[in-house]
Amino acid sequence: MSQGTWPRYPPCVSGSCTDQVCCSHGHKSRWPEQLGKKGDVAKATIEKDNPEVTVEILTPGRVGFADFCCNRVYVVVDSNGIVTNMPTIG
């Protein structure tokens, strides 16, 4: 895989990266400004800011995988669909 391009998730890929900065390839890797926003709005913004990631929205009771993926961002929302955790690559 050439540096600067991750395939779409799934499958999970990280190459030799073990942190968000390595994964970002110059794109954003964290979205603190999405806290308190609607999950679907956050998803669209994140995928626009970093076209190398796929956003998975985690609703109450849904748990994501613990593996580290450069091409995935989990957006955790409450029962009203509001983002409750800062979305980050991983």
Image (cartoon, helix red, strand yellow):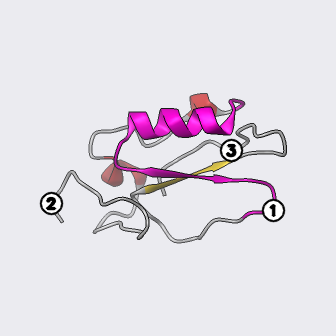
Q: Which residues are magenta?
A: 36-62
In primary-sequence order, the first of circles 2 and 1 is: 2
Q: Residues within 10 Å of mark 3 (few under 14, many from 20)?
A: some
Nearer to us in this view, 44 or 21:
44
The residue at the point 41 percent across, 52 percent down is 20
Left or right of 52 in this view: 66:
right
Picture quadrant of residue 35: top right
In the rendered image, which residue does mark 2 sit on? Answer: 2
Question: Is the N terminus in the top left, top right, bottom left or bottom right quadrant?
Answer: bottom left
Residue 32 image offset from top left, x and y in percent: 58, 33
Res. 90 mark: none
Nearer to us in this view, 64 or 88:
64
Nearer to us in this view, 77 or 27:
77
Whether residue 37 is situated above or below residue 84 in the rendered picture: above
In the image, residue 79 lies in the stretch drawn in magenta: no
The residue at the point 47 percent across, 66 percent down is 68
In the image, residue 61 lies in the stretch drawn in magenta: yes
In the rendered image, which residue does mark 1 sit on? Answer: 61
Q: Residues within 10 Å of mark 2 (few under 14, many from 20)?
A: few
Q: Residue furthest right?
A: 79
Question: What's the CA distance linking mark 3 and mark 1?
Answer: 14 Å
The residue at the point 57 percent across, 44 percent down is 87
Q: SS at mark 1?
A: loop
In the rendered image, which residue does mark 3 sit on? Answer: 85
**Mark 3 residue type:** Asn
Residue 28 image offset from top left, x and y in percent: 39, 37
Picture quadrant of residue 56: bottom right
Which-is-in-front pick, marks 3 and 1?
1
**Mark 1 residue type:** Gly
Question: What's the CA distance linking mark 2 and mark 1?
Answer: 37 Å
